[in-house]
């Protein structure tokens, strides 16, 4: 399968713990995006990378959230001191280049539950 | 500011009958619009996209959508629903930086 992959698919943690998610984009895609989807809502943009550079961050991305893409390939999203409000599906997407016509391909998501 | 409003959170149809999922958008510039589908435990899949070419856009699985600038709408239709169409559908607006703004979603239920 050469699509976008995410790991883990599910994560249950206790409030106050740190969690890290990984996204592997389609290999030739230089843009990588993170979204968050809460129950019953559409996904909301969090941040995106072009190669290893993080170019934009949403106001939704509090100081407890950090994302990296160190070599311009896979990306990690870390949440420190998790809160119950962080419970959501975290989606990763990738696209080729920065042309407006390019489609974003989504991974299956990581479902986070904070107890 | 840009936004997307999906007018129905749930739509229920019988198998073999037409499907209409409604979407209105607000954008300060010429928009790029998409419809994505999300099946349970699967990633979002692109159904179709409008990027300022033909206003009637055909997508996968028999779906199509018509861009109407005067009505700021981009409704999704299908002539005949199939059981496998049951899923969550999202209308999406893309900004100049290629970030996506999603509507709240419409859950389509198909009755046998």
Image (tube, coloured by chain):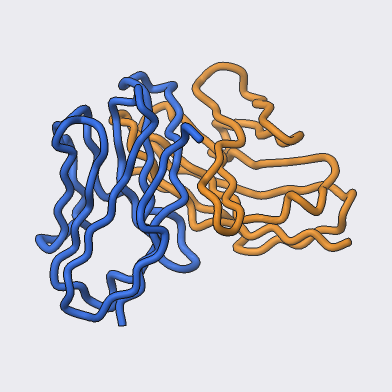
Q: Which one of the lettered chains is coloured orange?
A: B
Q: Which residue lies furthest to the left in this view?
A: A63
Q: Is residue A101 left or right of residue A22?
A: right
**Which sits in the foreground, A14 or B96?**
A14
Q: In this view, does A107 lie to the left or right of B11?
A: left
**Which sits in the foreground, A74 or B52?**
A74
Q: Is residue B93 above or below residue A28?
A: below
Chain A colour is: blue
- State the image coordinates of residue A14 (x, y, percent, origin top left): 25, 80
The residue located at (59%, 38%) in the rendering is B74
Q: Is residue A61 left or right of residue B107?
A: left
Q: Is residue A68 above or below residue B32?
A: below
The residue located at (36%, 27%) in the rendering is A27
The residue located at (42%, 53%) in the rendering is A109
The residue located at (22%, 80%) in the rendering is A15
- State the image coordinates of residue A80 (x, y, percent, origin top left): 14, 66
Position of the N terminus of chain B, as image quadrant, is top left
Q: In this view, does A59 lie to the left or right of A93?
A: left
């Amino acid at each position: 399968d050469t699509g976008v992959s995410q790991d883990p698919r599910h994560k249950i943690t206790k409030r106050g713990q740190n969690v890290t998610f990984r996204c592997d984009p389609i290999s030739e895609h230089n843009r990588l995006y993170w979204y968050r989807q809460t129950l019953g809502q559409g996904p909301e943009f969090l941040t995106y990378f072009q190669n290893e550079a993080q170019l934009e961050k949403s106001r939704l991305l509090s100081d407890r959230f950090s994302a990296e893409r160190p070599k311009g390939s896979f990306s990690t999203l870390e949440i420190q001191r998790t809160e119950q409000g962080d419970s959501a599906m975290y989606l990763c997407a990738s696209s080729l280049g920065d042309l407006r016509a390019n489609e974003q391909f989504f991974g299956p998501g990581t479902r986070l539950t904070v107890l | 500011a840009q936004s997307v409003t999906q007018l129905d959170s749930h739509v229920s149809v019988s198998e073999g009958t037409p499907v209409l999922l409604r979407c209105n958008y607000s954008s300060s510039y010429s928009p790029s619009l998409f419809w994505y589908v999300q099946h349970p435990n699967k990633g979002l899949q692109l159904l179709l996209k409008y990027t300022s070419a033909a206003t009637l856009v055909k997508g996968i699985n028999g779906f199509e959508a018509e861009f109407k600038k005067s009505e700021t709408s981009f409704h999704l239709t299908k002539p005949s629903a199939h059981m496998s169409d049951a899923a969550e559908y999202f209308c999406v607006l893309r900004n100049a930086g290629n970030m996506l703004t999603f509507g709240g979603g419409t859950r389509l239920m198909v009755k046998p």
